[in-house]
Amino acid sequence: MKNTILSSVVFLAIITSSTLGVLAQDYKALKTDASYYFYDSVVNDLIAIKIDSVVMSGNDILYFNFPQIRPTDNSFCHISDGASWLGDPVIEKPGGIFLFKTINAQDGIQTDTLVIKTQSILNEEWKFANFPFSDDHIDAQLTAIGNMTFLGLVDSVKIITLTRKNAAGMVVPNDINGEEIRLSKNHGLIRLPKFDAFNDYIRFYDITGKTNPETGNINPDLGTIFDFEVGDEIHTRFYSDAFSFSSSTQIWKIKRITGKITSPSNDWKVYHYDICFLKTIKTAPEWLPLNETGHLSVSDTIFLNSDFAVELAKQPNQTFMDPLSSFMISTSAFLKFQRPAKYLNYNYPFSASYPEDSCWSMVMVDGGCDPYYIKGLGGSYYDCPGNIFWYTYIDEIVYYKKGSETWGTPLDCDSLQHVDTKEYNSKEAINFYPNPTTGTITVVIPYGIELPCNIEITDIAGLKSVSFHINQPKQSFDLGNLPAGLYTYKLTSAKGDTFRGKIIRQ
């Protein structure tokens, strides 16, 4: 699937080959002046380039991005300083030829080489890579050069178009045909594949932010995650049920920021909150509710130089050591409400079998759930649907107000004291099939749920994608217009009961 998130993409001029020889020397695939962030909207994945070091080796220049967890030739052993998703080192050969290495996911060993010629001239062709698991190859051709606007920046950009060909040079039909790599004169690659996964899937990432100058979506740290002003509000819904589904707890919470103090040295912040909440505990078999409501005034201190702050400052996919648990931990980043957000991947740790052993192996855990944090909206939040190993654990934002910016449907403190509708775990009450779906999906409404119902389907960033009305106990809908990805649904009955769950569109 081809996807582009470059803003206001405009070509202002096409440079002819007669002038290209002068400009070709100015392009480089990688820049060391800033951290660059790239986004794949299909899987909601945010990755980064932050060159840690540059080394001269003869006539070559070696570029090293930050390391990642990688397996070794013994697939049970892992290292914390493996090659990054760029396939470190990236090698710049004389003449502006950049070599990127693919990585075998089973043993962490570099395999094929992908070639980008940054000094190519208009219409020049070259072999970009071998096609994965085939005797075919991928041909690259510089098809256009012109000014482009992205992230509010204007720069000259080279367009490199990819085509699959066989050994005879004939075009072979494939999804990669027509895909583009984009090379900015002053900012390096701004559209590129995930090099270390190129042999497993062909997916392209578009630039979404950079740090110098700071623009777009960049890596959130503790200071930007907890960045509130007096008057801001965060409304949340917490839900959990036990492994046996014999009890469930739900908490609706309105948190208003009433005060803020920042240290003179800006190494800590103190926030004062007013909290209104409704807590409901339901127990089987009658599911009788026990309600608790109230107001709280609380304070929270955010230490911007703490170990936790250091963890959250790490780049997406960067590996680090937790000094308390002696686990290797990594982060993963995504967009939520079109804001940068980050998981701390505690459910994917590695631990040495023995203190003197260099072989780190993945800890096998049933269930478990990673917390995530959102720029300007705090955390931790959780999105952990129930499965056969684990109970449901959801802690999500349903509304926020930051200055004049709002999202969602606000809760009302007075109304929380008189809530009489129910919220069910959807897998106990309704059925969606097939799930995953390639397009058409059928919903079955069991007896006792009052029709008509309304269903809202939103993408993983929290943006409404589509809605339907359900007028009969069994009804089908076409989701073929939705891009492939993970979606959440909220079904509301005529009585006001609500049901939530996930749909995967393949």
Image: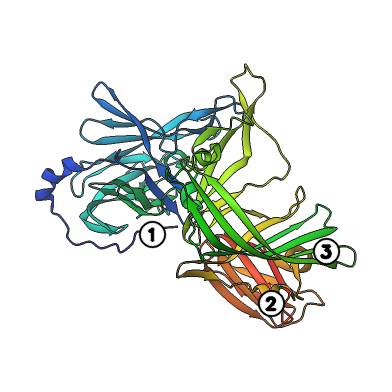
The answer for how far apart the CA atoms under marks 1 and 3 are is: 44 Å
Q: Residue, x 79% and y 74% (percent of image)? A: 446
Is the residue marked by circle 2 packed among few (<14), some (14-19), or many (20+) residues within 10 Å? some
Seen at 15% across and 54% down, the residue is: 15
Question: Nearest the camera: 355 or 75?
Answer: 355
Residue under circle 3?
282
- Residue 273 horizontal/vertical position (percent): 59, 60
Q: Residue visible at 22% across and 30% down? A: 94
Quadrant where the image shows the N terminus: bottom left
Amino acid found under the numbered disc labelled 3: Lys
> What residue is shown with label 1?
5
- Of the residues tagged 2 and 3, which is closer to the observer? 3
Task: From this view, report whether residue 310 is shown above or below residue 445.
Answer: above
Judging from the image, what secondary structure is the residue with disc 3 in? strand
Spot occupied by residue 365 in the image (x, y as percentages of width and height): 71, 39
Separation (CA) of disc 2 from disc 1: 35 Å
